[in-house]
Amino acid sequence: MRDEIEGRRIEVFLPTYARWSQWKDRRMRVEFPLFAGYCFARFPLAERLRVLTAYGVIEVIGVKGQAEPLPDGEIEAIQRLVAGRFDYDPHPFLTEGMEVEVVRGPLKGVRGRLIRKDRMTRLVLAVTLIHQAAAVEVHPADVVAV
């Protein structure tokens, strides 16, 4: 998809991260999209059809069917991250107050509400019928949005 859009002379950015993959006879470092299913492109709205007809493109993201530009600062931050010599990985987008599920560890499968997100995530497990709750600290990588 990226190559197809670039071939149409449209500015494109596909951030990737590298992982080691093991085959029967060798081990190689393989690039994967940082945001699975998303490729960023900068183009005038009049060029929307040229982007939409590129192989692999499903939709131009926006609000209520209208294309919505991403803030330049957000894209520039990702570009600087990718261009640097940092170790980075994809991470679920979690916000305080959202319902999450623990995906690793002894609490795997437990659902709760995310109360704080920093080095350790504060997860609240509620018993709604009696309006009581308990809080626990878990690693942010161990929870996903429900």
Image: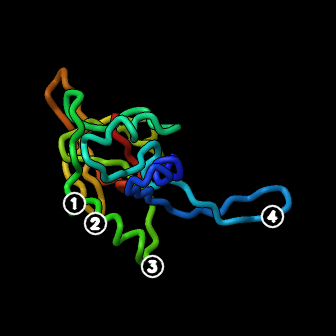
* Residue type, mark 1 in image: Asp
Q: Which residue occupies the foreground of this view, 146 or 31?
A: 31
Q: Are marks 3 and 1 in contact (CB under 8 Å)?
A: no
Residue beneath the point at 45% across and 42% down? 37
Residue topped by disc 1 = 72
State how far apart marks 2 and 1 are (Cα).
6 Å
Residue topped by disc 2 = 76
Report the disc number at residue 26: 4
Q: Which residue occupies the foreground of this view, 117 or 131?
A: 117
Specify which label sits upstream in the sequence, 3 or 1.
Answer: 1
Residue topped by disc 3 = 85
Q: Residue furthest top?
A: 129
- Position of 143 with respect to 95 (left or right) is right
Quarter containing the C terminus:
top left
Circle 4: element type: loop
State how far apart marks 2 and 3 are (Cα).
16 Å
Residue beneath the point at 22% across and 47% down? 69
Label 2 crowd (10 A; few <14 / some 14-19 / many >=20)? few
Given this view, does label 4 or label 2 mark the residue nearer the observer? 2
Q: Is residue 105 visible?
A: no
